[in-house]
Amino acid sequence: MTCIPLAVVGGAFCARETEQLLLREAFRENFLIGAALNDDVVSGKDPRAAAIVAKQFNTITAENAMKWVWIHPAPNTYDFGPADRFVEFGEKNAMWIVGHALVWHSQIPDWAFEDDAGGLLTRNAMLARLKDHIGSVVGRYKGRVRAWDVVNEALTDEGGIRNSKWKQTIGEDFIAKAFEYAHQADPDAELYYNDFSLDKPAKREACVNLVKDLKARGLRVDGVGIQGHWGMDYPTTDNLEAFIIATGALGVKVMVTEMDLDILPTAWEYEGADVSKRVALQVGLNPYVDGLPPVMEKKLTDRYVELFSVLCKHSDKVDRVTFWGVYDKTSWLNNWPVRGRTSYPLLFARDYQPKPAFYAVLGAVEKKK
Ligand code: G3I
């Protein structure tokens, strides 16, 4: 793939020009570009967001519809409605459809790990439940969902395997088993490992070793996704590049799977995306209720350009960049790690209009053509 270096864009765009500016066209030679969709987008309740997706992107990920707690809420009970709508939306718009996420320690009901008496299942019983779940979900969308986040967030920042109920019931090879079952359910689907903070050296190394281990077992693994819930000063571009190079050297696709940039004051020193952590709303943590001041807008824009420059530089290895949401108003970051904040993490504003960051990222590509 060719790479078009980016620079901060100057000047203004008239309305007619902006109509021609399409992310999916600008990055066609670089990587797929997409967004995670909630049910309002695919069900028709948010038609303006749906229009942005149809026009700008060529790949979509299910933000929530395919997580265990929603798609498999009770034993032998599946709710495929939202996931069906999501897949139909993707097919209608000829998109690369990504399923998220088959195995995660979060967003899964306790019963999934328990026997009738409320005790933890044995390894064999849990393996059978995992195989049944993956077979049901992946099997339903065989040939339609083109790729799956098979395992999400199994590594710790220190480079170990998270002590989840998956590990407690099955053992550390729950990861390998999930990849095995997903491949059995749809041999043509691409299979990914997905996690946050993979730019951190210890976690990066653990991820590299994990992919090597899966390959050594003869399993199919097509790619690694770094989530990309990033801030103004993390990750460093050096660490991001090191991750892309180390992962790309394994011969798998490198993807940014959940990109958004947090410009709000940090609620703590923590940089990851653990949904179990939340702090109480404080006024000082929500300073831009009435809009981003120009100096902060520029900071966000410049940071987007900086990160896209790295991604473009390595577009021989980077296969996809997916934003975690379509526009600022419905980003998860309005409610995490503090509920009820006004956040500005994406390329489209609360009123659906493209932001300066959109023009900076995309306009710079246009200029170089
Ligand atoms: O749909 C219900 C609604 O009926 C109910 O009234 C409301 C009350 O809280 O909750 C709604 O569900 C919420 C759901 O998002 C849909 O909006 C859940 O509470 C909320 O916990 C859930 O948050 C999602 C979170 O994962 C947990 O599943 C976010 O939307 C989603 O963006 C986020 O995505 C994760 C990725 O899957 C993995 N990587 C980190 C990323 C960010 O946390």
Image (cartoon, helix red, strand yellow):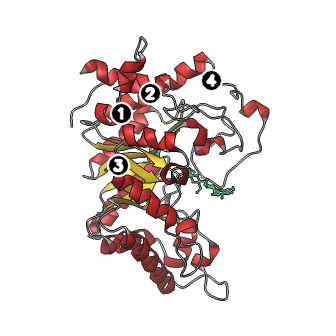
Residue drawn at (44%, 40%) of the image:
51
Which residue position is annotated with label 3?
A: 93
Residues under numbered marks 1 and 2 in contact, where contact means CB atoms less than 8 Å apart: yes
> What is the three-letter code of the residue carrying label 2?
Phe
Q: Secondary structure at mark 3?
A: loop
Residue 216 x, y percent position in the rendering: 28, 67
Q: Secondary structure at mark 4?
A: loop
Sequence-wise, the earlier of marks 4 and 3 is 3
Residue drawn at (49%, 68%) of the image:
80
Q: Nearer the viewer, mark 1 or mark 4?
A: 1
The residues bearing labels 1 and 2 have C-alpha atoms spaced at a distance of 9 Å
From this viewpoint, which residue is outermost toward the top? 11
Sequence-wise, the earlier of marks 4 and 2 is 4
The residues bearing labels 1 and 3 have C-alpha atoms spaced at a distance of 15 Å
- Which of 294 and 239 lies nearest the eye of the viewer? 294
- What is the quadrant of the C terminus in the image? top left
- Is residue 6 among what the camera can see? no
Residue 236 x, y percent position in the rendering: 46, 33
Residue drawn at (59%, 16%) of the image:
294
Residue 81 x, y percent position in the rendering: 50, 66
Q: Does residue 97 lie above or below 216 as drawn?
A: above
Sequence-wise, the earlier of marks 1 and 2 is 1
- What is the quadrant of the N terminus in the image? top left
In the picture, the disc for residue 358 is 2
- Which of 87 and 299 lies nearest the eye of the viewer? 87
> What is the three-letter code of the residue carrying label 4?
Leu
- Is residue 61 among what the camera can see? yes
From this viewpoint, which residue is outermost toward the bottom? 117
Sequence-wise, the earlier of marks 1 and 3 is 1
In the picture, the disc for residue 23 is 1
